[in-house]
């Protein structure tokens, strides 16, 4: 038996083992199953080739060709799924053209088996070999195209290495077939093919493309273990000699025990040795992070900052996973701003992640330290109640693909600690305890620099807002003069054309003249609202007198009832112990009247509008003493995608709206130090809640909270209201947003704190 046959047998067994190891990891992931199908097909081809060489069986030669015909579609399908991963970003497509050629090959093979054995002729083998290896080279070409299309330098380099390795392995495998055509060549293609498939399997397990250093390290580990196995079995074969062949099975059993005993410690020693050899990566990581940290003081754009950090971590080759989360404008949670490796959750809800956020705020959260803390509690009394929250935290870290989480802390303080602007997560899943104390300190310094960038960006946006409003005010003065004068002339001329009894001198023109007057009034209203919004200073909290919000609400009720439709019911509930606030009652009544009119307009077919006042110990602004005025309607609701645009000037969901009512209300409440919260469910209604800070502390002993049912609920020991037992009108999930002030402290922690 020649070397080609033996190498085919070994290749069949090893490639089968590689495919089986992937299937054992997961049978649900499409990329795993496609790789297994590819490797099993290649293994079947090698096995049939070996049996053909050993037995010279025409049937096995025909089966080998059948397996070879299946290799191109399975290979192309796997590589296209592989390249379409989010970390690589290739297009999603299937091997459609290749499948057509595969069907042609199947038909010819069936014809060859039934009619005449044309599969043994050179006229068939040459085009057939072109088809098989052409399909494999097509995979290499796809990787080359993705290499050219990849913009990230690190991913581009790694895809290039894989393309080059695929080209070499395919070419050398082709040379192993040449001896069948009378050309002598050493059997090295099978060896390269096995190694290439093995490293491809490792990229699936690591969920990222492995780099050259890791390739070398794994080759060293695998090669050393192979030498160890060879040495043990070689020694046993030498020891038993020619006359003691019967002892081979017993010696093989002993050798297996020896190998199993030595395997783990030898592998661990080799991996640690290689990691020390690759220690320069750690130095490179610190150097790149330090370079980014020096650049951050000159960065104002937060997305640019996140992109720089992720790129530096990626190019350091020390990270398998990393992510950055930033607090959203509503303060209700943290949105994923950038990531490396596997995709973590897109959003972290502040209320759901309370335990994690409290733990991170006190310092970085390390998964290894958390594991050690869980293990230390194992033997203590009442261990399970203490271990359960820690285990939940550890599981959440695994879901986020995070080994360590660092807080991005602002300079402002709350009752719970510093403002939490975001989270910075890193992980290297290749080794345990991947980061030492110096690495952690480097990450912490980077998190501090990133937090300063976020605060600088917020300050810059506030300055831009003030400049914009100043320019808007200057423009508004000229706009009022340029628009109102011709508007007055147009309106006056239209009114002169109308008779005293409301009829026009020309009866056919009456309707058009009424439209002119109506539209002139509407345009004048737009100009007035625009001037109100552009006015830089409005009465606010500072220097203002105390306001009884209940009196303002009663006045608003009177105005709303004056033009209330019969199909709408208005309910008002007042908390007689509502604290007074500091502000301007006329401005606040403008806000309440606008919210009430919006609610009535949202119920064209009738419904119920509830206005209630109540005291609160907590809002999105944090803990304190607040007066809340709530407007709840049973109207059509607001779509989720429009919620965050409600307070943008000139944005409106009405056909004839100006888009300035809520924007002006937003500014007025901000100037009073308060906030507006919105919750809405399509088809069931919306709730606008205005929170305003109390002018002075509540009297001691007033530890109750008023609810819309009129009952008083005592507060718990943490000075925090219990949940209102009265159910809301809708049980369906609702959308929510919050209007936060553009000035003052950064827009952070308002639902965390």
Image (tube, rainbow, N blue to C red):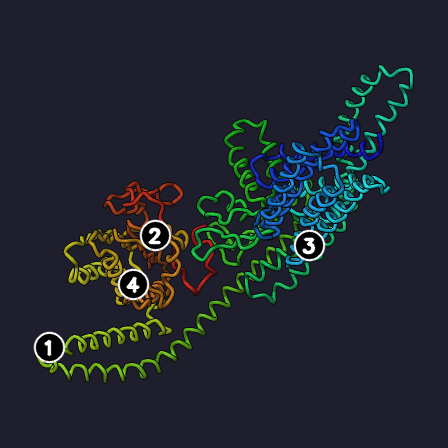
**Picture disc at residue 679:** 2
Is residue 506 toward the left or the right of residue 529 in the image? left
In front here: 249 or 253? Answer: 249
> Which residue is under mark 3?
144
Q: Secondary structure at mark 1?
A: loop
| Badge 4 vs badge 1, beta-carbon distance below 8 Å | no
Q: Characterize the local packing of mark 4: few (<14), some (14-19) or many (20 or more) Cα atoms within 10 angstroms.
A: few
| SS state under label 2 | strand
Q: Nearer the viewer, residue 1 or 100?
A: 100
Q: Could you tell me which residue is drawn at 39 percent across and 76 percent down?
A: 472
Q: Secondary structure at mark 3?
A: helix
- Image quarter where the N terminus lies is top right
Which residue is at 68% across, 52% downward?
A: 141
- Front in this rendered view, residue 232 or 34: 34
Residue 290 coordinates in the image, percent (x, y): 68, 58
Mark 1 or mark 2: name the one nearer the start of the chain. 1
Residues under numbered marks 1 and 2 in contact, where contact means CB atoms less than 8 Å apart? no
Mark with earlier residue (4, 2): 4
Q: Earlier in the sequence, mark 4 or mark 1?
A: 1
């Amino acid at each position: 038996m020649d070397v080609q046959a033996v190498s085919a047998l070994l290749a069949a067994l090893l490639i089968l083992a590689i495919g089986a190891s992937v299937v054992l990891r997961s049978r649900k992931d499409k990329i795993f199953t496609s790789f297994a199908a590819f490797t099993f097909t290649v293994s079947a081809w090698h096995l049939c080739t070996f049996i053909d060489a050993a037995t010279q069986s025409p049937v096995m030669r025909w089966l080998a060709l059948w397996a070879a015909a299946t290799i191109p579609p399975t290979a192309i399908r796997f590589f296209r799924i592989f390249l379409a991963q989010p970390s690589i970003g290739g297009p999603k497509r299937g091997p459609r053209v290749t499948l057509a050629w595969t069907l042609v090959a199947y038909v010819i093979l069936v014809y060859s088996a039934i009619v005449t054995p044309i599969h043994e002729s050179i006229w068939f083998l040459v085009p057939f070999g072109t088809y098989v290896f052409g399909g494999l080279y097509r995979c290499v070409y796809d990787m080359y195209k993705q290499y050219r299309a990849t913009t990230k330098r690190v991913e581009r380099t790694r895809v290039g290495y894989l393309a080059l390795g695929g080209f070499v392995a395919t070419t050398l495998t082709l040379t192993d077939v040449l001896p069948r055509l009378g050309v002598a060549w050493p059997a090295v293609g099978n060896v390269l093919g096995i190694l290439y498939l093995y490293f491809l399997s490792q990229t699936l397990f690591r969920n990222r493309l492995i780099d050259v250093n890791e390739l070398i390290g794994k080759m060293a580990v695998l090669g050393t273990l192979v030498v160890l196995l060879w040495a043990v079995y070689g020694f046993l074969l030498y020891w038993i000699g020619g006359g003691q062949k019967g002892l081979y099975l017993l010696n093989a059993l002993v050798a297996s025990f020896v190998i199993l005993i030595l395997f783990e410690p030898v592998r661990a020693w080799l991996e640690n040795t290689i990691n020390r050899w690759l220690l320069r990566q750690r130095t490179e990581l610190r150097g790149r992070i330090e370079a980014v940290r020096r650049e951050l003081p000159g960065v104002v754009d937060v997305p640019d900052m996140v992109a720089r950090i992720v790129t530096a971590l990626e190019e350091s080759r020390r990270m398998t996973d990393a992510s950055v989360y930033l607090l959203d404008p509503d303060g209700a949670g943290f949105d994923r701003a950038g990531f490396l490796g596997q995709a973590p959750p897109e959003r972290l809800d502040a209320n759901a992640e309370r335990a994690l956020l409290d733990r991170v705020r006190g310092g970085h959260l390390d998964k290894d330290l958390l594991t050690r803390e869980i293990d230390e509690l194992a033997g203590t009394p009442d261990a399970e109640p203490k271990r359960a929250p820690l285990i939940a935290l550890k599981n959440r870290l695994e879901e986020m693909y995070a080994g360590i989480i660092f807080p991005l802390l602002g300079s402002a303080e709350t009752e719970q600690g510093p403002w939490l602007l975001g989270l910075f997560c890193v992980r290297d899943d290749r080794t345990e305890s991947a980061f030492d104390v110096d690495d952690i300190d480097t990450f912490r310094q980077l998190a501090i620099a990133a937090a300063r960038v976020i605060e600088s960006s917020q300050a810059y946006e506030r300055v831009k807002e003030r400049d914009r409003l100043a320019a808007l005010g200057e423009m508004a003065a000229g706009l009022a003069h340029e628009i109102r004068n011709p508007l007055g002339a147009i309106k006056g001329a239209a009114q002169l054309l109308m008779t005293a009894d409301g009829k026009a001198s020309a009866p056919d023109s009456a309707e058009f003249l009424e439209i002119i007057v109506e539209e002139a009034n509407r345009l004048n209203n737009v100009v007035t609202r625009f001037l109100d919004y552009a006015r830089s200073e409005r009465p606010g909290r500072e220097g203002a007198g105390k306001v009884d919000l209940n009196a303002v609400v009663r006045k608003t009720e009177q105005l709303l009832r004056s033009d209330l439709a019969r199909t709408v019911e208005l309910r008002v509930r007042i908390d007689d112990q509502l604290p007074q606030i500091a502000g301007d009652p006329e401005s606040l009544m403008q806000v309440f009247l606008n919210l009430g009119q919006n609610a009535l307009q949202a119920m064209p077919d009738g419904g119920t509008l509830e206005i209630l006042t109540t005291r609160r110990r907590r809002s999105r602004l944090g803990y304190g003493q607040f007066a809340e005025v709530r407007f709840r309607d049973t109207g059509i609701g607001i779509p989720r995608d429009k919620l965050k645009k409600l307070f943008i000037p000139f944005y409106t969901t009405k056909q004839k709206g100006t888009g300035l009512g809520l924007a002006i209300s937003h500014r007025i409440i901000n100037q009073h130090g308060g906030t507006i919260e919105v919750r809405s469910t399509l088809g069931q209604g919306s709730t606008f809640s205005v929170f305003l800070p109390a002018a002075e502390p509540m009297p001691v002993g007033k530890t109750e909270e008023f609810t819309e049912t009129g009952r008083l609920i005592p507060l718990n020991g943490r000075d925090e209201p219990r949940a209102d037992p009265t159910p809301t009108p809708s049980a369906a999930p609702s959308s929510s947003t919050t209007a936060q002030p553009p000035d003052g402290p950064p827009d952070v922690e308002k639902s965390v704190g």
